[in-house]
Amino acid sequence: MMLIPTHHFRDIERKPEYLQPEKCIPPPHTSPVGTMWFIRDGCGIACAIVTWFLVLYAEFVVLFVMLIPSRDYVYSIINGIVFNLLAFLALASHCRAMLTDPGAVPKGNATKEFIESLQLKPGQVVYKCPKCCSIKPDRAHHCSVCKRCIRKMDHHCPWVNNCVGENNQKYFVLFTMYIALISLHALIMVGFHFLHCFEEDWTKCSSFSPPTTVILLILLCFEGLLFLIFTSVMFGTQVHSICTDETGIERLKRKNQPREHTGSWESVKETFGGDFSPNWFNPFSGPCHPEPLRDGDWVRQVTLSDTDNMETMTESEEGKDKDSVEVIDE
Ligand SMILES: [Zn+2]
Ligand SMILES: [Zn+2]
């Protein structure tokens, strides 16, 4: 933690060395644009596999225990199409959320040349992430799992084995929405199936033995309820974050202080990809791509009184988010 008392401003004038850029060696292989993004985290990969397994389990029970043995063909075909379509969209959203770069800041760009090229003016500061050696633009946070700074990072989700940030929040929201919908749909079908089978002979109700059928259906019920609750809460929180334009991390950091960002329809449109259209629900259509970072985006303006506040802020956050700050006051 490097704190700059206000009276020390002069001491650090014209010293890009203050951020120790010599310790920032750009990664040897800068990955070319378009390389697939995938986080190699054992826990995340396991959670992502479990997610797929649970969706495929629901598919199996819905198709082979409930719909195919049913003699009501219209009911089976309509529900089969709806369930499979929603499950396909859920898994497609999951893949897109997992394999999309959430908005990673270039690694190791906190070099002396880069800081000097920004030509900081009086009262301007840059924040350097000491963990990945990058200059953090506003609203970027470091993720210890991805080992990168992520723009507008909301949280790291092990279920999609990725951070939820500026570029993949749409896919994450769609993923939670489609999982909630298939859970609800499966629960309704299980309900109908139980009602129907209590009236009829159980042996005609399913191609499996009655005890196996009941166990498979109860497990599906349990899974459906759990995921319906979990994903609806997540979906609600995410929609609230997008509408108020405040990420989960910013909400946690703000505590009881007044809000910095005010929500706008523009930020909702940016997240979902333009004016309201069916594409908002399409995991194959992306969000509005943010403008590439310009020089001004790396630099943050502070006033002297702000700097006092900033010091207290970084002090209180010691150990949590070790931002280094360089202040140039000429
Ligand atoms: Zn970082
Ligand atoms: Zn992450």
Image: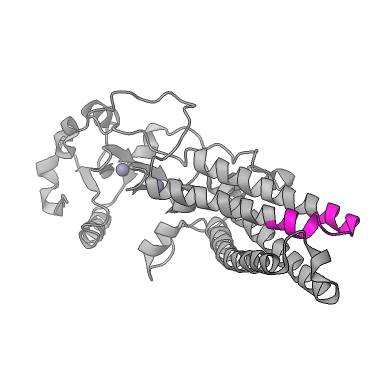
Considering only vertical position in the picture, is 124 above or below 174?
above
**185 versus 171 height, above or below:** below
Q: How many marks?
A: 0
Residue that appears at 23% across and 43% down = 130
The relative height of residue 32 versus residue 86 in the rendered view (above or below) is above
The image position of residue 179, as x and y in percent, is: 63, 56
The residue range painted magenta reads 61-79
Taking the magenta stretch, the answer to whether it contains residue 189 is no
Query: Viewer-proximal residue, 77 or 138?
Result: 77
Q: Nearer the viewer, residue 234 or 59?
A: 59
Residue 63 colored in magenta in the image: yes
289 sits left or right of 22 in the view: right
Q: Residue at x 27, y 36 (%)?
A: 120
Q: Is 185 placed left or right of 57 in the picture? A: right
Residue at 64 percent of width and 69 percent of height: 218
Tell me residue 214's x, y (percent): 68, 69
Question: In the rendered image, is residue 173 in sight?
Answer: no
Q: Nearer the viewer, residue 70 or 164?
A: 70
The one of 236 and 325 positioned closer to us in this rendering: 236
What residue lies at 64% left-to-right and 60% top-to-bottom?
A: 180
Compared with 44, 299 (above or below) is: above
Give how far across and how far down residue 178 sits, in percent: 65, 54
Q: In the rendered image, is residue 134 in sight? A: yes
Q: Main secondary structure of the magenta part?
A: helix
